[in-house]
Image: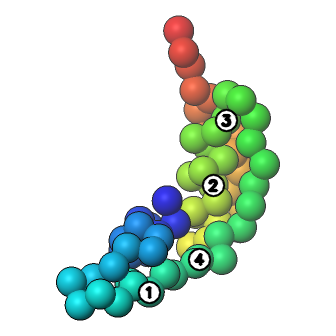
Amino acid sequence: MLALLAGGSAYGQETAEGRADPVVVLDVPFLAQTESLCGGAAASMVLRYWGDSDIQAGDFPAADDA
């Protein structure tokens, strides 16, 4: 997923010239998740990467499988 966010291709994919595309690994901060807050945790990690250090997984509604 990080390669997609960085605008890169899948890891190890070769170009038409036979060279491997460069892989960009972003320094996205890890945030633990609960079962119902996986989306909130993912969104929070990306927003923290972009500088919003106050965001928490609980700031997003929990997933509801009902």
Mark 3 to mark 4: distance in Å?
22 Å
Mark 2 to mark 1: distance in Å?
26 Å
Please state if 20 lies on the left or on the right of 32 as rendered.
left
Name which of mark 3 and mark 2 comes first in the sequence: 3
User: Does dot 3 land on a helix, a strand or a loop?
Assistant: helix
**Is label 3 in contact with label 2 (beta carbons under 8 Å)?**
no
The outermost residue toward the left is: 16
Between circles 3 and 4, the one closer to the viewer is 4
Mark 4 to mark 1: distance in Å?
13 Å
Between circles 4 and 1, the one closer to the viewer is 1
The residue located at (74%, 61%) in the rendering is 30
Between circles 4 and 2, the one closer to the viewer is 4
- In terms of depth relative to the viewer, which is nearer, 58 or 42? 42
Image coords of residue 12 (percent x, y): 45, 74
Q: Which residue is mark 2?
A: 44
Q: Is residue 11 above or below residue 40?
A: below
**Is label 4 in contact with label 1 (beta carbons under 8 Å)?**
no
Name which of mark 1 and mark 3 comes first in the sequence: 1
- The image's mark for residue 22 is 1
The residue located at (53%, 9%) in the rendering is 66
- Asked which colour scheme the image uses, the reply is rainbow
Mark 3 to mark 2: distance in Å?
10 Å
Image coords of residue 46 (percent x, y): 57, 62
